Image: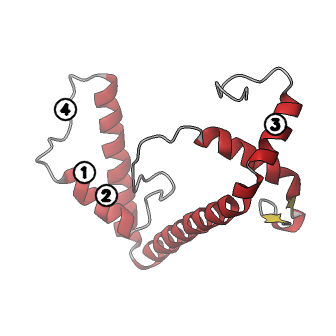
Amino acid sequence: MSLFPEYKVPASASKVYTTAVKKVENLMLPLLKFIRKIGQGQLIRRQIANLLQFGCQLDAHLLYQALDTFNRGLVNDIRIHYANPEKPYPDSNNPLLFETTVLLEACGLDDPLQKIYVTSQPLEGLPVLLFLFLLAYLPKVMCTPLLCLSFSFFV
């Protein structure tokens, strides 16, 4: 099959993609269930962070503002270090970054969608499988105008 390399479009793309989707059709429903679970977990993590952030803004506004300002300053210092390595960077023995991260997570100032929880080796063929998944399910997705960015699957 001419799906490799992934970064090139095959010569007769429509025919190749239709054939490929049919070959992996039995994997699509389990993959849909798995992707839905991942998406639901991401939404729950984001909602928890938003609730923590809102609660911290209401209950401990000065702490929230001080932590936000400290975080911005720390991130700027790290960016300056990467732009000019001669500038200082917190030592590995210094608990500054670790302790700040704990406080940021407790106040909801982190981005749970950017956090890496588990790492693994790249799986060969996964990008192609996810692309075929999109080809199979995007025609079945309908946007709900009342909810703006909310989508619903009709499977």
- Identity of the residue furthest to the bottom in this view: 59
**CB under 8 Å between callouts 3 and 2?**
no
**Label 4, on which residue?**
88
**CB under 8 Å between callouts 1 and 3?**
no
User: Which residue is drawn at the image coordinates 66% and 66% (left, top)?
Assistant: 33
- Of labels 4 and 2, earlier in sequence is 4
Q: Nearer the viewer, mark 1 or mark 3?
A: 3
**Numbered disc 4: secondary structure:** loop
User: Which residue is drawn at the image coordinates 69% and 61% (left, top)?
Assistant: 32
Residue type, label 3: Tyr
Picture quadrant where residue 75 is located: top left
**CB under 8 Å between callouts 2 and 1?**
yes
Residue type, label 2: Thr
**Numbered disc 3: secondary structure:** helix
**CB under 8 Å between callouts 4 and 1?**
no
**CB under 8 Å between callouts 4 and 3?**
no
Can you tell which mark lies on residue 13? Answer: none
In the image, is residue 118 above or below residue 135? below
**Label 2, on which residue?**
101
The quarter of the picture where the N terminus appears is top right
Can you tell which mark lies on residue 97? Answer: 1
- Of labels 4 and 3, earlier in sequence is 3
Decide if residue 89 is on the left or right side of residue 93.
Answer: right
